[in-house]
Amino acid sequence: MKKIVLVVVFAAFIISLAGCKKNVEEEASESIAESFVENPEIADMDIGGTVVVKNEDGSEVSYGSTQWPTSDLVKDVPVCKSGLITGTVDSEEYSTIYMEEVKEKDALEYLEELRRKFPDNSYEVNADDIISYGGENSNGIAVVIYYDIASESISISVSKVTE
């Protein structure tokens, strides 16, 4: 029951942001930039095609790549070969891949592959134009996908399972 409530809340949050995506992205970018300008001791930052933040503990988080992440965390997750990667967030603790132009047929095939590879503690929600799935594998990795049929967009979130 908790999972269903969380999925519904997450879906409502995403839907509410859909109309103001550009403003949210702009505000988030400005907020991140201001944090680093005002507090340069927070992390070292290399800016190229992506932003890589190196934290004081040596860990790194990369933002904005249009390539499939390469962290160890994502190695169990099959690559979604359909669509266009529009952005990523990647670290050893969590990763999220944002994609557009993913046809429904391809999203459903990818979902089936995730069902096979992440069958534990799984759930699925199909509501109107939204398909969401979450599951875990035996390596302690959790994956959640959210596919919006109308916009042909998908987000794939990966994290370590927490007890």
Image (tube, helix red, strand yellow):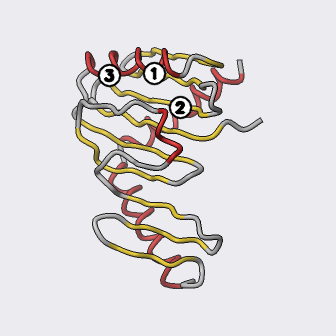
Q: Secondary structure at mark 1?
A: helix
Image coordinates for residue 96, horizontal then vertical, percent? 46, 44
What label does residue 143 carry, if any? Answer: 2
Q: Confirm whether residue 151 shows in the render.
A: no
Which residue is painted at 52% across and 64% down in the image? 60
Does the CB distance between marks 1 and 2 fall below 8 Å? yes
Earlier along the polypeptide chain: callout 1 or callout 2?
1
Residue type beneath disc 2: Val
Residue type beneath disc 3: Ala
Q: Secondary structure at mark 2?
A: strand
Q: Quadrant of residue 129?
A: top left
What label does residue 107 carry, if any? Answer: 3
Image coordinates for residue 97, horizontal then vertical, percent? 40, 43
Is disc 2 surrounded by few (<14), some (14 to 19) or many (20+) residues within 10 Å? many
Q: Closer to us: mark 1 or mark 3?
A: 1
Which residue is painted at 57% across and 83% down in the image? 39
What label does residue 89 carry, if any? Answer: none
Q: Is residue 28 above or below residue 40?
A: above
According to the picture, the residue beneath numbered tag 1 turns out to be: 114
Marks 1/2: CA distance? 8 Å
